[in-house]
Image: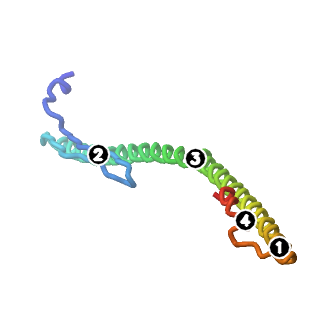
Amino acid sequence: MSVVESVRNAAVKARIRHDNVAGVKLPVFRLLEFQTEDMAGIGKGGEQIRNARESFQRLLEMMVKIASLQTSFITLDHAIKVTNRRVNALEKVVIPKMENTISYIISELDELEREEFFRLKKVQKVKKKEVERIDLLVKAAREKGVVPAPSAINTGDDFDDIVA
C-alpha cells in the first residue's frame, strides 16, 4: 500500500495519434516519456534495480507496439467486413436489379420499334392502294378520251392524319 500511495505522477506517459491507411483511421500509440528515479543501493542492488527497470522499459515499449498493432488489426478487420458487405450488396442486389431494368427497357424499346415499323408498313400499303386507285381512274378516263383536271384527282392528302 505504501508504494501506491507514494506515486504522485505517472512514470510512463503514452500518446495516441491516427494514421490514415486506405481511408481508414488507425490508432497508433507511442510512449512519450519514461521518468524514473535513480536508486543507488549498497553493493550491486542498485545495478540490479537499474537492469530490471531497463528490462521493464523495453517490455513496456514492446507492449505499446503490440497494442497499437492489435488495435490496427481490429480496426482494419472491421473496415474489411463493412466493405465486403457493401460489395455483396452490390453484387447480389443492386447489379441484378439494374440488369433487369436494362433488359426491360431494351425489350420495351424493341417492342416500340416493331410497332412503329408495322405502322409505317400499314401507311405505305394504304398510300400504295390509293395511288393504284388514282392510276386506274386516270387510265379509265384516258381510255374514254377524257383527261381529268389535276384538281379532280384525289392525291391522297386525306391520309396525312394516319402518318401524324
Q: CA distance from mark 4 to mark 3?
A: 59 Å
Circle 4/circle 3 CB separation < 8 Å: no
Circle 3/circle 1 CB separation < 8 Å: no
Give the numbered dot on residue 30.
none
Q: Tell me the crowding category of disc 2: few under 14, some 14 to 19, or many 20 or more residues within 10 angstroms, Cα based.
A: some
User: In screen coordinates, is 61 left or right of 89?
Assistant: left
Residue 75 x, y percent position in the rendering: 41, 44
Residue 22 sits in quarter? bottom left
Give the numbered dot on residue 154.
4
Sequence-first tag of 2 and 3: 2
For marks 2 and 3, give the one nearer the viewer: 3
Task: State the SS at label 2.
Answer: strand
Residue 107 x, y percent position in the rendering: 69, 54
Task: State the SS at label 3.
Answer: helix
Pick the front one: 45 or 54: 54
User: In screen coordinates, is 45 left or right of 115?
Assistant: left
Q: CA distance from mark 4 to mark 1?
A: 14 Å
Q: Amino acid at mark 2?
A: Phe
Sequence-first tag of 3 and 1: 3
Sequence-first tag of 2 and 4: 2
Where 63 sits versus 163, above or below?
A: above
